[in-house]
Amino acid sequence: MTVAETAARMGRTILVVEDEPTLRETLAEALADDGFHVIAAADGRAALTRFRADRPDLVLLDVMLPELSGIEVCRIIRAESPVPIVMLTARGAEVDRVVGLELGADDYVTKPFSLRELTARIRGIFRRNERQATTAAPQVVEIGRVEADLAGHRLLRDGEPVALKPKAFELLAFLIRNPGQVFTRAQLLDQVWGYEYAGETRTVDVHVHWLRNEIEADPAKPVFIQTVRGVGYVFRREG
């Protein structure tokens, strides 16, 4: 790690929300060793208190928590802030993962996981946010009846705001900025989610499904976000 990278990380605070003491301490130690400032909470209500008091730069959030579930905590935090949220879920808890994504979680990690993979994903999220912060030129793009305000992170249909999950909008913005280019699911995960991802590519399919429901006249026959069989997805600006 370079001196500049260390300094950047030391300015970032991560809230670790985990009710199992040993895992909570392990996560806090690993993240601190990686250069982050770490605060912790053992239940959902304490998590909200710490979040509102300390305003961390990222929340690492277990799904199964006492007092308030991680799903409920995610919902409340997302209503208050665009802070990145990484959820920890039990192996095979597909419903929890999908609900978390629907509520606006940026990523999820399935237990058991490697600390190296977790810290790599967190670093990737911060890198992706930095890239977005330096993206030039506010831009409004028309997609049929829909307008995408890339700078304002807003989607309008016939002039009315469309509720869209943050990560889904980021995926749409990336595709819009790269029209006609075919991307694999792994490439989209790397570019939008901010890390090299091996294995769970269904995340991209879920977000594409949400986008098609909002921007396509017939989501079953998409003309803007098209599937390239055996490869991935491509955005066609003219449909």
Image: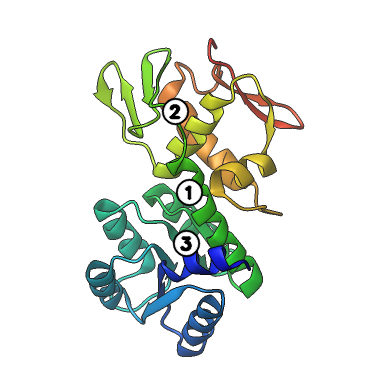
Q: Is residue 120 left or right of residue 149?
A: right
Secondary-structure class at tag 2: helix
Residue 72 visible from this viewpoint:
yes
Look at 62% across and 74% down and name the residue there. Answer: 115
* Snapshot quadrant of residue 231: top right
Q: Mark 1 highlights which residue? A: 130
Q: Amino acid at mark 1?
A: Glu
Q: Is residue 128 left or right of residue 40?
A: right
Q: Nearer the viewer, residue 133 or 82?
A: 133
Secondary-structure class at tag 3: strand
The earlier-in-sequence mark between 2 and 3 is 3
Q: Amino acid at mark 3?
A: Val
Look at 31% across and 62% down and name the residue there. Answer: 72
Q: What separation in Å lies between label 1 and label 3 (alpha carbons)?
A: 17 Å
Q: What separation in Å lies between label 2 and label 3 (alpha carbons)?
A: 25 Å
Image position of 217 with respect to 66: above or below: above
Q: Nearer the viewer, mark 2 or mark 1?
A: 1
**Residue 215: percent from left, percent from top:** 43, 22
Secondary-structure class at tag 1: helix
Q: Which mark is residue 227?
A: none
Q: Nearer the viewer, mark 2 or mark 3?
A: 3
Q: Residues within 10 Å of mark 1 (few under 14, many from 20)?
A: few
The earlier-in-sequence mark between 2 and 1 is 1
Q: Mark 2 highlights which residue? A: 213
Q: Mark 3 highlights which residue? A: 86
Q: Nearer the viewer, residue 228 or 149?
A: 149
Look at 52% across and 84% down and name the residue there. Answer: 29
Q: Amino acid at mark 2?
A: Asn
Q: Residues within 10 Å of mark 3 (few under 14, many from 20)?
A: many
